[in-house]
Amino acid sequence: MELEELMKKQGKIACKVRKRLSGGGRKVQFPVQEKLIARRILQQRALHVRVLRRDAARFAKEIITNPSFKASPGWISRFMRRHKFVTRVKTTAGQSLPKNVSDRIVTTCSKRIRRNQLPLPCIANMDETAIWADMPGNSTIEVRGAHTVQISTTGHDKQRITICLAAFADGTKLKPFVVFKGKRIPKEISNVHAAVIKMSDNGWMNEDLTMEWIATVWNDSVDPGSAKRMLVWDTFKCHFTSSVKSLLEESNTDIVAVPGGCTKILQPADSPPDADDSEEDESEVDDEWSLTQGSDNEDGLDGVEDSEDEVVDSHEID
């Protein structure tokens, strides 16, 4: 290194010296088997089957029978790099968002907070989100540069329940409100006390269930006649019926209505849980939501309109 630096100073070297010659380094130990693994991944992706790193490791262990081979995370990363595989998110249609969306949402809510002098424990966000019977996830191993990334399902991806999640700005989580499809609550969950269980004809929220959420979750979180509170939620039509607005007014609640358009950015609760990054078991339930009131802040806002005043005042309760 000293000789190299000396030669650089003397202008003898015009470009950077290569650290490794082309073709240098350790040779691939199982080149034929790697081609078979890559072919199997391509076959799965041709059927739009989701393929994760753990699936690639399983393929490798099935094809490479050498007892010393471990299919370690490092080997999987190098294998993917050698064969131009990357982890991709399922492609979806894009959505055009208004300009300065985050700044305008913050400004809108800040005005309300200053106007009513609200502390963090009095500011909450609620949103309904679907939990699907089949959640195949959005990411899969795919060839680098692929324009379309499709993932097949088991056919049960339309079966769902609805869950209403709410949290205060200080991180306090309210009891989950879960809506199943049907007429009667199944015996298996009739004695659940960690969540409010309700039924509807289609498994969706409606005006009556929204009023029940206010009565059993929102008003139960604090004395309804105590302090002024602010509830931030989207413009779902059931949120702004006369009955719902009247019930919230009785509970001393001020509404901030944030129209749709920015769900994926500003409303974490609107996206179904997925463990793509860590590739953990996607059937696990967040115990902090289902069993206790945790301390993590889960509040979010759902969307924005062109006019900042419309966001606040279109459904304002005076």
Image (cartoon, rainbow, N blue to C red):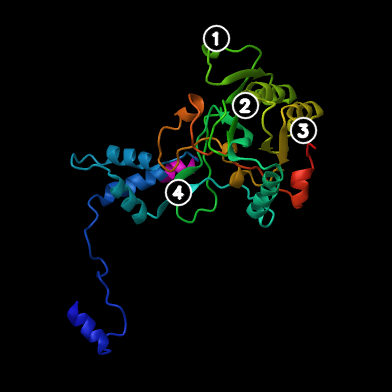
Secondary structure beneath label 2? loop
Q: Amino acid at mark 1?
A: Lys
**Of discs 4 and 3, which sits in the foreground?**
3
CA–CA distance in space, label 1 to label 4:
44 Å
Range covered by the magenta-colored residues: 42-47
**Foreground: 278 or 239?**
239
Residue placed under numbered mark 1 in the picture: 187
Residue placed most toward the observer, 296 or 163: 296
Which badge, 3 or 2, is on the more N-terminal residue? 2
Instruction: Judge depth for marks 1 and 3 and give the one in front.
Output: 3
Res 7 quadrant in image: bottom left
Which quadrant, please, contains the C terminus?
A: top right
Labels 3 and 2 touching (C-beta < 8 A)? no
Up the image or down, 315 lies above or below 290; here it is below
SS of the residue under disc 1 = helix
The reply to whether residue 285 is in sight is: no
Is the magenta region chiefly helix, strand or loop? Answer: helix
- According to the picture, the residue beneath numbered tag 2 turns out to be 222
Q: Position of residue 90 (x, y in %)?
A: 53, 45
Please tell me which of labels 1 and 3 falls first in the chain. Answer: 1
**x%, y% of residue 83?**
36, 54
> Which residue type does callout 3 highlight?
Phe
Label 2 or label 1, whichever lies nearer to me, is: 2
